[in-house]
Image (cartoon, coloured by chain):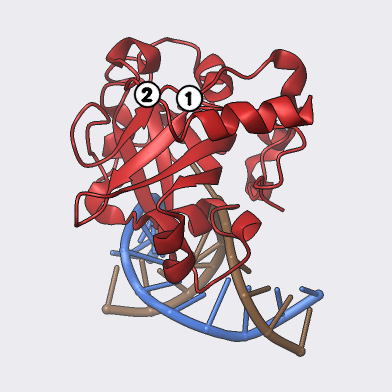
Chain colours: A red, B brown, C blue
Amino acid sequence: MLSSLQDQAADTSTSKRKRLPREFFTRRDVLLVARELLGQVLVVPARDGARIAGMIVETEAYRGPADRASHAYGGRRTRRTETMYRVGGTAYVYFVYGMYYQFNVVTNVEDIPHAVLIRALEPVEGITVMRKRRQAHADHNLASGPGKLCIALGIDRGLDGADLLGDRVWIEAGRSVRPASIGVGPRVGIDYAGEWVAKPWRFWIRDNVHVSR
DNA sequence: TGTCCGATTGGT
DNA sequence: CCAATCGGACAG
């Protein structure tokens, strides 16, 4: 089973992949979108026309305004959170801890601030560039965290608000992941969120070495 | 304007 | 376990 997973993952680097359509992102269930983003491929074009890409192996759903862990909790609408109120299929990129960027995918229709944090990628294309940016770390440590993947792909605040159906960053169809291969558990780094801390809204591909932690 | 703190990471 | 490092949110 493990080998078939790897074969399929390898397949995504050679076959033609289709870009995910608007309708994938505008669905109302952010938990469903978070699960189905596993196995899809996040792509950022490099300067010379090359591509930097990684298969999504870990995600977290944020369901504002009810979700206390969300930046949009209570309907909070500020310059930073405004992006989350845009239509599904928009990139929400923010800066934290004074040094890291975090890449999110906005879901649902306009004015409903739901989003999926992309927490880890398995490198697929542009691995040499990723190694350079991440200072020659082992491959399983190139993009195995939300801050790390932004460094590896060169993502910064300039991509906040970018349309995922545009040409600055997008997501292509990779492989579907069987429910049995999906790990489910509580989100991390949100100890301030009270009862919402325990919600099992973190998803990952089981046995994949590129998952964080 | 001042203070508090974070959807993390890497080193001790 | 802890420091790094600075923008965002909010109180005053």
Give the residue pinned by disc 1: A174
The residue singled out by tag 2 in the image is: A17
Horizontal side, residue A81 vs residue A58: left or right: left
Residue at (64% x, 55% y) in the render: A140
Q: Answer above or below: position of A36 versus A118.
A: above
| Helix, strand or loop status at disc 2 | loop
- Classify residue A188 as left or right of residue A160: right
Say which residue appears at 44% left-offset and 62% top-offset.
Answer: A128
**SS of the residue at dot 1?**
loop
Q: Position of residue A150 (x, y in %)?
A: 42, 55
Residues tagged 2 and 1 counted as in contact (Cβ below 8 A): yes
Hey, what amino acid is under mark 2?
Answer: Arg
Task: Give whichever of A10, A89 is nearer the camera.
Answer: A10
Q: Earlier in the sequence, mark 2 or mark 1?
A: 2
Which chain's residue wears label 2?
A
Please rate how many residues cluster around mark 2, counting C-alpha atoms within 10 Å: few if below 14, some from 14 to 19, many from 20.
Answer: some
Q: Tell me the CA gap for discs 2 and 1.
A: 7 Å
Please determine whether, in this image, residue A54 is positioned above or below residue A33. Answer: below
Q: Given the image, on which type of amino acid does mark 1 rest?
A: Gly
